[in-house]
Amino acid sequence: MSSRGCVAALFLAFACIAGATELLQPSSEHFIVSVAQLQAGSRAQFDAWAAHNNKEYSSAEEAERRLAVWTANVQRQASKLAAADANGAAAEVSVNGLADVSLEEFKAGYLGQVSRRNVEALEAGKKKDHRYRYENIVPPAEVDWRTKDIVGPIKNQHVGGSPCGCCWAFATIGVTECIVAMATGKPISLSEQQLIDCDKAAPWYDLGCEGGDFEGGVDYIIDNGGIDTEKEYPYLAHDDKCIRDKEGLAPKASTLDGFGHVPVQNETALAQAVSQHPVAVAVCCGDHIDNWHAYTSGIFKIPGTDIPGGCTDPLDHAVVVVGYGTTKEGEDFWIIKNSWGETWGEKGFFRVPRNVGAPLAAFGLASQPGYPIKKGVNSNADPIRTDIWQEVPRSPTAGTTATS
Ligand SMILES: *[C@@H]1O[C@H](CO)[C@@H](O)[C@H](O)[C@H]1NC(C)=O
């Protein structure tokens, strides 16, 4: 699956709703496996892990198959920990909810190619006569949109065992949910499936379970006069028949008015945007697929590399940056929402190093950030195609190679 980057932004200075602000704590809820016990046999710990993660397998054969996959994954993690430990030992492994998924399944069902869309816009960002909307913003030291009651629920793009490379739809919807909640004052859950089914033909060029990007996704929502809710148009994890307005409601649950680009390869510019609202980004996972698969908590780094995920790989995933901060020890990080369920990472979120001194940033996240724009609660304003760099038209032919 590819997510060609779905970006949603809202560019109006809406009053940010300072609603209920319950701070999300990083999860320490992952199952801890004892390496000594694992060596004596993995079944008991697998069963306890499966109960911990509410796993239900369709048959005894399936449970056996998952036990074997799980054991191989956990043993690989234990060996890596041991190799990184000066004493060559690892007593415990923190194991997330994806440990019964093989790396091959993970690659097929959780990642995808992200096409580099709208090249003119990205290039235009480097021109001196184009001005960045947020260039004069002085970003605060830290921002966490999860405390503002605007970030929608953590979802899982991989359900029912059928791989659907639609991270682009989850990133489009993830950032759109935030922008809509900021404009309306109410959190909302919107439909990925409508994008997967309908955002296909020209001029959007996304490819459902075969990939796409968040700019095309936002364009679809603009052109469709909105998007249905998750409840009206639930996620199926496969390509299905397009229904452009399931409940026959117009305007639909939410409308959008435009798409904004953040200057590429610039973490300062990204912080300026994220200080105003969440931003969708494309990342590359493939170089370090097993680290992504096994991530549980903390600032996600790749042992032995200075700049995590140097991104020699194509962009193969799309996610939503929902904040940033600095640890007590002085380490800068981004806070990112993923679409792999709540049993992965910090309750479905993860953190990566920030201000790493490399143009593409950690895992390439500064490659093509963007966001939807919403001017009012449900406005009928003429869509803004390009709000930041005025001379950048939407490219009618871009994005045909997207995968997600
Ligand atoms: C990065 O963005 C900042 C703030 O928008 C800007 O001042 C700076 O010139 C940009 N850096 C580069 C290398 O473009």
Image (cartoon, rainbow, N blue to C red):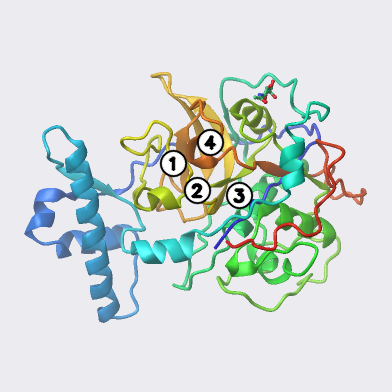
Would you place residue 11 above or below residue 396 in this image?
above
Residue toward you, 119 or 35: 119
> What amino acid does circle 1 point to?
Gly
Residue 309 — which label? 1
| Whole-number angstrom distance, CA of label 3 to CA of label 1 | 27 Å
Q: Which residue is mark 4?
A: 22
Q: Residue at x 34, y 59 (%)?
A: 53
- The answer to whether mark 1 is within 8 Å of ligand 1 is no
Whether the residues at callouts 3 and 4 have beta carbons within 8 Å, the answer is: no
Q: Which mark is residue 284?
A: 2
What kind of element bears circle 2?
Answer: loop
Residue type marked 3:
Gly
At which x and y percent is residue 258?
81, 47
**Disc 3 crowd, CA 10 A, few/some/many (<14, 14-19, 20+):** some
Residue 306, relative to residue 294: is it above or below?
Answer: above
**162 sits to left or right of 32:** right
195, 306: nearer the viewer: 306
The answer for how far apart the CA atoms under marks 3 and 4 are is: 14 Å
Of badges 2 and 3, nearer the viewer stands 2
Mark nearer the N terminus (3 vs 4): 4
Does residue 206 appear in this view? yes
Q: In the depicted view, which residue is nearer to us: 162 or 4?
A: 4
Q: Which residue is mark 3?
A: 152
Point 41% across, 49% down: residue: 287
* Circles 2, 3 touching at the beta carbon (< 8 Å): no
Mark 2 or mark 4: which comes first in sequence?
4
